[in-house]
Image: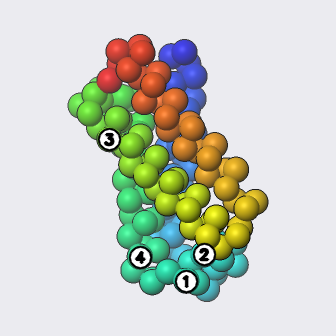
Amino acid sequence: MNIGLWISQSLLALLFTSIGIMKVVMPINKLAENMKWVETFPVNGVRTIGVFEILLGLFILLPRFFKILPNNTITFASYGIIVIMLGAVYTHFKRQEYSFIAMNVFLLLLAVFVVYAGKKLQLF
């Protein structure tokens, strides 16, 4: 289970950090080519979501890797990812973009696994 936890945390860290960076640095019209929902959100809202995704991506893995306050940080980062993914599922459902929901649910379940496995292994 420990290896699965490392893999899950690494995958979440990679995905959330890279997607967050895209949302922060890419022009909105370029971003809207692949993420149609950004057209209906304010630019600052998209950028803010990107910043939160970068922070969550870093905080889901780095505290455990460097052994710096892993207990609360990883748990809060996992809950943050769960909240963002719930918002993503809601947004895609409301916009009838059903093909994106499966990935959002997968990432949500991965974050739930990180919380569960971390508590089960008493790592955090």
Looking at the image, which is closer to me, 84 or 124?
Answer: 84
Q: Are marks 2 and 1 in contact (CB under 8 Å)?
A: yes
Q: How far is mark 2 from mark 1, CA to CA?
A: 6 Å
Residue 10 position (above or below residue 119): below
- Residue 37 shows which numbered tag? 2
Q: Which residue is mark 1?
A: 40
Residue under the image location 75 percent in, 60 percent down = 99
- Asked whether, in this view, residue 81 is left or right of residue 63, the answer is right
Q: In what element is the residue under mark 4?
A: helix
Q: In what element is the residue under mark 2?
A: helix
Q: Which residue is mark 4?
A: 45
> Which corner quadrant holds the N terminus?
top right
Mark closer to the chain start, 4 or 1: 1
Q: How far is mark 4 from mark 1, CA to CA?
A: 10 Å
Question: Three-letter amino acid code at disc 1?
Answer: Thr
Category of crowding for the residue at label 4, using alpha-carbon neighbours closer than 10 angstroms: few (below 14), some (14–19), many (at least 20): few
Q: Which residue is mark 3?
A: 76
Residue 119 position (above or below residue 14): above
Question: Three-letter amino acid code at disc 4?
Answer: Gly
Q: Residue furthest right?
A: 99
Q: How far is mark 3 from mark 1, CA to CA?
A: 28 Å
